[in-house]
Image (cartoon, rainbow, N blue to C red):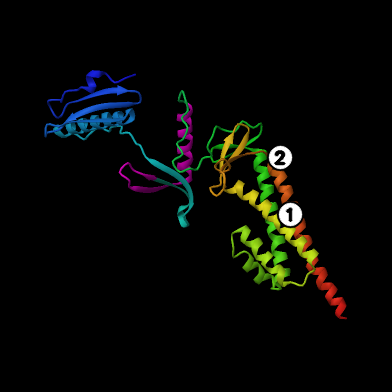
Amino acid sequence: MQLPDEFLQAKPIQRFHRFAIVEHGDHAYFGLLGEDGVNNYFQCPRAVITGLALEFGGMAGHMEALSKNLPPSPQMVPFYTTMVFAGAMLGGDAGGHVMLNFFTPSGDGLTTTLNPECAATLEQSLKTSLDALPHRPKPIDVFNTYTPGPESKASSTSEYFGQKYPSKTLEALGLLMVRANLLDRAMVQLFTRLSGLNAEKAEALFFSSRNNSARVGMILALLPTVNLNEEHKKEINKSLEKARSVMDQRNDLVHGEWRFNEDKMAVDLFTPTAPKPEKRHKTLTVTPQFIEALASEYRGATMMVSAACHYQMAEEDREYLGSE
């Protein structure tokens, strides 16, 4: 649909308080003639026109009431804003209240609190009202708190924060987190054995870095300084490279962009340092089997790193027995 030609060639409105509105798609177009004789044209979404109409209606009602010395009647005014509810343990008598934070169209940030009973009543009232609509609207994710994509179609789902996730995928992710922690513990033990530090100091130094590659590098830097045969050093190096590999794969999952993908999940990866442009973007299809396989790789890496600790212990025992 095209705008009418006569509107494109519109003549100035003679009286500044008059305006013309033409609808086109989801927008409305109108012109206002200023007191300076210049006709100005505007466009805006239909919702804005609706808001203007309600506000002008409210203003007219107030003006009429004021002229008759009557209290103004209540008017419905549209409320467009950005808001979020958050549970808050505020302490004292306010403990367990729900905080409502929102920004007004003018940009002011406002906060209020609702007691749990009031919040529950509001939730039920809103749900009942929304369910009665012909088409239940989807919330607008202005805070990037929703996983993008259509809702999961997996046969078994678990709902969190208003979205349904594949239950088996969540279960496998939990297993992966546990396996990742076990590998960390094995690496701390290896670092402790190779460095000769006590457990407390070694752990503090090891976890002072949040970067897995740097942690592997710390252990590798110790190898030339320890009394081990070359074969054992090679095995330790091999175990650490295995650990680095599985941790890199986990980092891809953690730091990629997650989204729903029918009955599965998907993770979009971006590697700006990849030498070829076609290698910089990659998508992983995340299934429970994929995560369980990675968890199994973590288990294997943990066993290899733990075995490396025993190489150091065996050398120490051999030296001790030889000194007797």
Q: Crowdedness of circle 2 by 10 Å Cα count: few (<14), some, many (20+)? A: few
The dot on residue 301 is 1
Image coords of residue 47 (percent x, y): 33, 30
Identify which residue, 62 or 317, lies in the foreground: 317
Q: Is 128 covered by the magenta stretch?
A: yes
Residue at 68% across, 59% down: 184
Does 81 appear above or below 24?
A: below
Quadrant in which residue 168 is drawn? top right
In the foreground, 25 or 282: 282
Q: Position of residue 29 (x, y in %)?
A: 27, 26
Disc 1 marks which amino acid? Ala
The quarter in which the N terminus is drawn is top left
Q: Which residue is mark 2?
A: 289
On-image quarter of the C terminus: bottom right
| Residue displayed at 35% across by 23% down | 25
Left or right, 150 with reference to 176: left
Judge whether residue 244 is colored magenta.
Answer: no
Q: Name the kind of residue labelled 2 in the image.
A: Gln
Magenta span: 102-131
Q: Is residue 287 left or right of residue 112?
A: right
